[in-house]
């Protein structure tokens, strides 16, 4: 109960902060598409932004952070305070050097980088603006990589709120640079937005520095590739780079196929905006749970308490499924109202909504699997098994590429610009089921029957909710309303009604997840009253 309470408490803090960030992220994206629409300029901006973002996930929040946390928690457990901070300082400056080299190379070879992300059939399009924007944005990688390390250190001290809140600064910076009074000082809005990304990345790191200093980090200069802790991180990082990295290469694959000449203009923008809507759900609770359990599982693995580790994983999978399964169904059914209300303004017109809604529908198919993979992979890493996720992710990558080719060449009329999203969704399902089954076979019972019972109840409640959403969308005749306030009212009513209905059904059918969350909350209140 104590571990469940800690997971839910930590996840709730991260979730609350992340929801605020995602709301601002929506305002940010709404401002971007309002200024750029689904045009060649918007595709250039999102392409330039996606590339350093991909490297960030590979080097920063991906392989580096997940490799650092287990090593750092071991140092905190077994070493003196001086040794702990010597390790942290050396890793900081060594990472800064590596990131600086990657950043300079990315800026110098920007034309090659951009052309790598565009298929030969699309090379005829003019990507000069994308190259210029990429050079402005690429230093963002340097700052966000250091911010990810700072986040890892603070998470090990069970400080989650501040690191989770740093994306708020990125969103605010981009929003500020999207305002006419600011972007008029630049050549065009796209350049102003790129500068906003760079400023926001710097702020994400700088805001965490005071707390790091408070905890004991003095940033004493020292670069060392021979430090035992750094070598351990590097040793763990290489296979995790390929494991998590292969998953992020799917991001590259989607970008590559979205830029195909056969795709409608604005397909990359539509894919990006749909992905942002998905992140709102993932960041709202799924990623929050994953962030909360990684340090916990690392401590459990260090203590050789594998039974507790398995219980942590099982509980997290059920909680995330309880959120993501109905969310996925709701996104699929209400895809057009969601995109129309959130984004159809300015240069983002009705055709833009149709493109984005189609991508969102196919992305939503894989939402539960995508969220669950983020829980299962760290479980393998906590046990020291770094090879299995790499092998499974490699197969998943091949599946994604093959499906993208099939959808583009043979089923294009059916899926159109949603092909990359659907390929990613199906590949994620393979990734999750393969990893879960292998973990179960190697490390023993995971309470699979209990998980399946929970899933059955969740699917039943979500199915009834989905039917209600469809009838609500049909009978409110959302598409005939032209006034924004009327659309917003109808949309808000549909979302609120669906949420209340789902929670009520979950209570009626006694879904364990509702009972567990409610039970932990009431036990906490009762305990507080008893203490008083």
Image: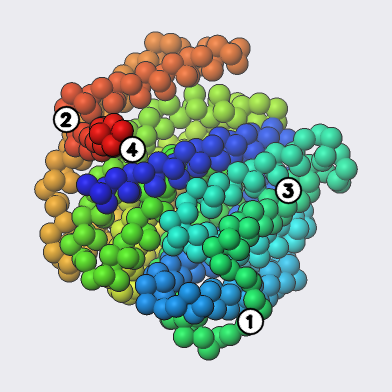
Q: Earlier in the sequence, mark 1 or mark 2?
A: 1
- Up the image or down, 128 lies above or below 17; here it is below
Residue at 29 percent across and 25 percent down: it is: 502
The disc label shown at residue 196, or none: 3
In the picture of the structure, the residue carrying the numbered disc 4 is 323
Q: Residue at x 49, y 79 (%)?
A: 83
Q: Give the Cα separation between the discs numbered 2 and 4.
A: 15 Å
- Marks 1 and 3 close (CB-CB < 8 Å): no
Name the disc covering residue 510, or none.
Answer: 2
Which residue was labeled with disc 1?
A: 222
Q: Secondary structure at mark 3?
A: helix
Single out the mark in the foreground, 2 or 4: 2
Q: Where is residue 203 shown, x and y percent of the image?
A: 68, 53
Rounded to the nearest angstrom, the CA distance separating label 3 from label 2 is: 47 Å
Q: Are marks 3 and 2 in contact (CB under 8 Å)?
A: no
The image's colour scheme reads rainbow
Label 1: state its secondary structure. Answer: loop
Locate residue 400: give its quadrant.
bottom left
Question: Mark 2: few, some, or many residues within 10 Å (few <14, many ≥20)?
Answer: few
Q: Earlier in the sequence, mark 1 or mark 3?
A: 3
Q: Earlier in the sequence, mark 3 or mark 2?
A: 3
Q: Label 4, label 1: how many angstroms apart (C-alpha)? A: 45 Å
Which residue is at 45% across, 60% downward? 157
Q: Is residue 443 left or right of residue 264?
A: left
State yes or no: discs 1 and 2 in contact (Cβ < 8 Å).
no
């Amino acid at each position: 109960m104590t571990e469940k309470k800690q997971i839910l408490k930590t996840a709730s803090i991260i979730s609350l902060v992340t929801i605020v960030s995602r709301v601002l992220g929506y305002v940010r994206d709404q401002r971007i598409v309002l200024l750029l629409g689904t045009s060649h300029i918007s595709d250039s901006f999102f392409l330039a932004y996606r590339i350093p973002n991909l490297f960030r996930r590979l080097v920063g929040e991906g392989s580096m952070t997940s490799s650092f946390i287990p090593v750092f928690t071991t140092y905190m457990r077994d070493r003196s305070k001086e040794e702990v901070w010597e390790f942290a300082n050396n890793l900081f400056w060594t990472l800064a050097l590596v990131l600086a080299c990657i950043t300079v190379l990315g800026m110098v070879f920007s034309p090659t980088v951009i052309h790598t992300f565009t298929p030969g059939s699309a090379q005829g399009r003019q990507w000069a603006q994308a190259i210029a924007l990429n050079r402005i944005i690429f230093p963002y990688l340097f700052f966000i990589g250091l911010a990810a390390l700072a986040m890892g250190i603070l998470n090990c001290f069970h400080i989650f709120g501040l690191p989770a809140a740093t994306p708020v600064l990125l969103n605010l910076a981009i929003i500020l640079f999207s305002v006419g009074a600011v972007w008029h000082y630049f050549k065009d809005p796209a350049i102003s937005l790129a500068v906003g990304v760079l400023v926001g990345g710097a702020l994400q790191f700088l805001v965490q520095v005071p707390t790091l200093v408070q905890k004991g980090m003095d940033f004493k200069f020292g670069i060392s590739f021979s430090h035992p802790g750094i070598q351990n991180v590097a040793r763990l990082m290489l296979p995790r780079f390929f494991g998590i990295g292969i998953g992020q290469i799917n991001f590259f694959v989607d970008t590559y196929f979205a830029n195909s000449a056969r795709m409608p203009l604005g397909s990359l923008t539509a894919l990006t905006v749909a992905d942002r809507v998905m992140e709102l759900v993932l960041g709202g609770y799924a990623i929050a749970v994953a962030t909360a359990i990684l340090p916990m599982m690392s401590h459990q693995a260090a203590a050789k308490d594998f039974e507790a580790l398995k219980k942590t994983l099982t509980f997290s999978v059920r909680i995330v499924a309880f959120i993501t399964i109905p969310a996925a169904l709701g996104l699929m059914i209400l895809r057009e109202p969601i995109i129309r209300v959130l984004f159809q303004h300015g240069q983002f017109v009705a055709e833009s909504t149709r493109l984005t809604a189609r991508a969102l529908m196919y992305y939503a198919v894989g939402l539960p699997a995508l969220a669950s993979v983020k829980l299962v992979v760290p479980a393998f890493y906590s046990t020291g098994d770094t090879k299995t996720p790499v092998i499974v992710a490699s197969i998943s990558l091949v599946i994604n590429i093959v499906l993208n080719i099939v959808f583009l060449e043979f089923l294009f009329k059916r899926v159109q610009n949603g092909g990359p999203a659907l390929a990613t969704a199906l590949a994620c399902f393979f990734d999750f089921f393969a990893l879960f089954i292998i973990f179960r076979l190697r490390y023993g019972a995971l309470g699979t029957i209990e998980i399946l019972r929970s899933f059955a109840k969740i699917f039943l409640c979500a199915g009834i909710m989905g039917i209600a959403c469809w009838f609500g969308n049909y009978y409110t005749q959302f598409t005939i309303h032209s006034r924004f306030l009327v659309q917003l009212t109808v949309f808000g009513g549909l979302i609120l009604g669906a949420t209340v209905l789902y929670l009520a059904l979950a209570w009626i059918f006694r879904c364990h997840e509702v009972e567990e969350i409610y039970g932990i909350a009431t036990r906490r209140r009762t305990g507080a009253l008893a203490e008083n």
